[in-house]
């Protein structure tokens, strides 16, 4: 046996750790994935199942919260429509923009714009609209068809600083402007 001369008895280029040949660096046999510290394949399957279940639970919880916020926002929008009617604030024909933003299209929907840039609106039926449409020749000739969306409690959430506003504040501004 040839040694590297440092007194350890290792061959040149060998690993300094005394690991049995074929063992993985994660504690399990070579080629077998394992949870750090356990080394058993059945532990890996249990760990994966637990992580999958946790991810599914988290996704379900996020969806539940989103649905709850949407329901709260829908109540605000219906209250706004009633208040706008009491104050005599007339709805206007809504216009939509193409996804590229280079064209506007008329719609058959009446409502109130919630933002000054006219990208979000509430219809007379209390539905929330994102005013972006695919556009095209049909929309140019017949008008764009708006599809209601689930309303958020915060408009522009996740956008750049200064671009988000709570739905309640946006409604208050519309009522102030009359």
Image (cartoon, grey):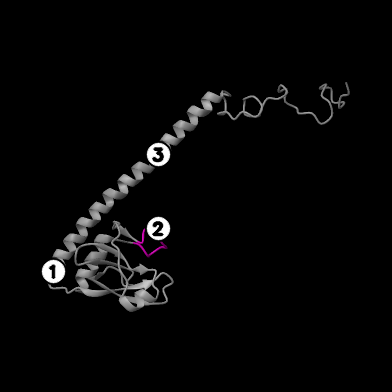
Classify residue 105 by image quadrant.
bottom left
**Is disc 1 in contact with disc 2, using a CB cutoff of under 8 Å?**
no
Between residues 143 and 131, which one lies in front from this camera angle? 143
Q: Secondary structure at mark 3?
A: helix
Q: Earlier in the sequence, mark 1 or mark 2?
A: 1
10 Å crowding of disc 1: few (<14), some (14-19), many (20+): few
Which residue is tagged 2? 158
* Magenta run includes residue 175: no
Quadrant of the snapshot with the N terminus = top right
Between residues 55 and 9, which one lies in front from this camera angle? 55
Q: Earlier in the sequence, mark 3 or mark 1?
A: 3
Q: What span is in magenta?
A: 156-164
C-alpha separation, residue under disc 3 versus residue under disc 2: 23 Å
Q: Nearer the viewer, mark 3 or mark 2?
A: 3
- Counting from the top left corner in percent of width and height, residue 20 is at 71, 21
The disc at residue 85 is: 1
Q: Nearer the viewer, mark 1 or mark 2?
A: 1
**Is disc 3 in contact with disc 2, using a CB cutoff of under 8 Å?**
no
């Amino acid at each position: 046996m040839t040694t590297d001369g440092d007194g350890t008895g290792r061959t040149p280029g060998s690993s300094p750790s005394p690991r049995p040949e074929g063992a993985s660096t994660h504690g399990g046999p070579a080629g077998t994935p394992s949870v750090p510290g356990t080394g058993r394949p059945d532990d890996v399957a249990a760990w994966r199942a637990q992580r999958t279940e946790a991810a599914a639970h988290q996704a379900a919880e996020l969806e539940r919260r989103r649905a709850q916020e949407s329901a709260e926002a829908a109540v605000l929008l219906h209250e706004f429509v009633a208040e706008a009617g009491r104050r005599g604030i007339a709805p206007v024909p809504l216009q939509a923009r193409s996804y590229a933003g280079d064209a506007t299209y008329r719609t058959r929907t009446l409502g109130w714009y919630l933002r000054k840039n006219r990208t979000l609106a509430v219809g007379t039926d209390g539905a929330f609209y994102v005013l972006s449409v695919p556009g095209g020749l049909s929309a140019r000739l017949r008008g764009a068809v708006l599809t209601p969306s689930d309303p958020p409690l915060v408009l522009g959430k996740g956008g750049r600083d200064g671009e988000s506003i709570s739905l309640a504040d946006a409604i208050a501004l519309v009522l102030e402007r009359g």
